[in-house]
Amino acid sequence: MDTLVTTDWLSQHLDDPDLVVLDCTVHTLLDEGGDFVRNVSGRADYDHGHIPSAGFADLTGDLSDSSSSLEFAVPTAEQFCSAMGELGVGDHSRVVLYDRSLSVWAARVWWMLRWAGFDRAALLDGGLKVWTEEGRPLSTEPATRHVKQLTPVPRPGLIADRDEVFAAINNDTVCLIDTLPGPLYRGEQQSLYGRPGHIPGALNICAVDLLDESGRYRPLGELAALHDGDRNARNITYCGGGIMASSNAFIMTRLGFTDVAVYTASLQEWAADPANPLVVGAY
């Protein structure tokens, strides 16, 4: 199984006994002025209709560390694997992940699986949007899967922390990539986290730009033109909460970058501390 599968592929393999499909949707709510309000679980929409046999992977719940003050904080590998096991994901499973918008939430779960040592996972290209536009069936039946054993084999290098990012500012061998929209990167739009701007030295490659108008990922040639850096260097992606950054990390992995990490705490941690510098304007 490739790390990116089509709706045709998934339709043909839905009944494979080792295949686990998971809806990873989270909704970002905005007020009438377009300002961020909060993130909420997509469980209600899942209950109203999802890809047949799909379970629900809740990034606002069991897949995050509820003891942290940071939203979507990464739990321990053992906690994460236990939660995935409850969803029927085992050491010998194959997993297809999707969401209802931009594939960024699915990409975050894909990256966490990879961080935990599991490589048999893929994103559904175009997610539920393309699936429904093609007239494919939906179900309201909850998934019924046996609990499986998913053994954690952590790869700590796939997640960067604040100290590594701070050190990277003055390290020309490390590439920082801000995956937020340009106005946020440049500080032209008010940040959700108090202080505007980007981490010094960071390039801007917005995760939304990885997709075409249908919501599918662009061809690899176009994506390679966006990510034209050193494929053997250390690359660290970030955004507001490590979600959009996971989509870039997913694509960079598909492009053959060998040392990619996601700063999962991202600007929600970075901007909260005045000791962490931010730059307003273009790179």
Image: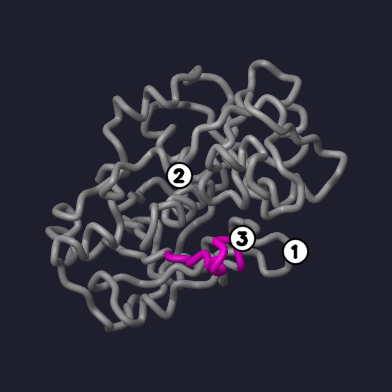
Foreground pick, 178 / 144: 178
For the residue marked with disc 1, what is the amino acid? Ser
Tell me the element at label 1.
Answer: loop
Q: Residue at x 34, y 42 (%)?
A: 211
Q: Which residue carries the number 1 mark?
A: 69
Image point (53%, 68%), residue name: 29
- Label 1 Cα neighbours within 10 Å, binned few <14 / some 14-19 / many ≥20: few
**In x, y percent, where is residue 4?**
29, 45
**Residue 274 seen:** yes
> What residue sits right under mark 2 in the picture?
247
Residue type of the residue flagged with mark 3: Phe
Identify which residue, 92 or 96, lies in the foreground: 96
Residue 218 quadrant: top left
Label annotation for residue 72: 3
Q: Is 34 contained in the magenta span? A: yes
Residue 249 shows in this picture: no
Q: Which residues are magenta?
A: 25-37
The answer to whether residue 199 is left or right of residue 259 is: right
Horizontal and vertical percent position of residue 37: 61, 67
164 vs 5: above or below: above
Mark 2 crowdedness (10 Å alpha carbons): few <14, some 14-19, many ≥20: many
Relative horizontal placement of residue 273, taking residue 221 as reference (left or right): right
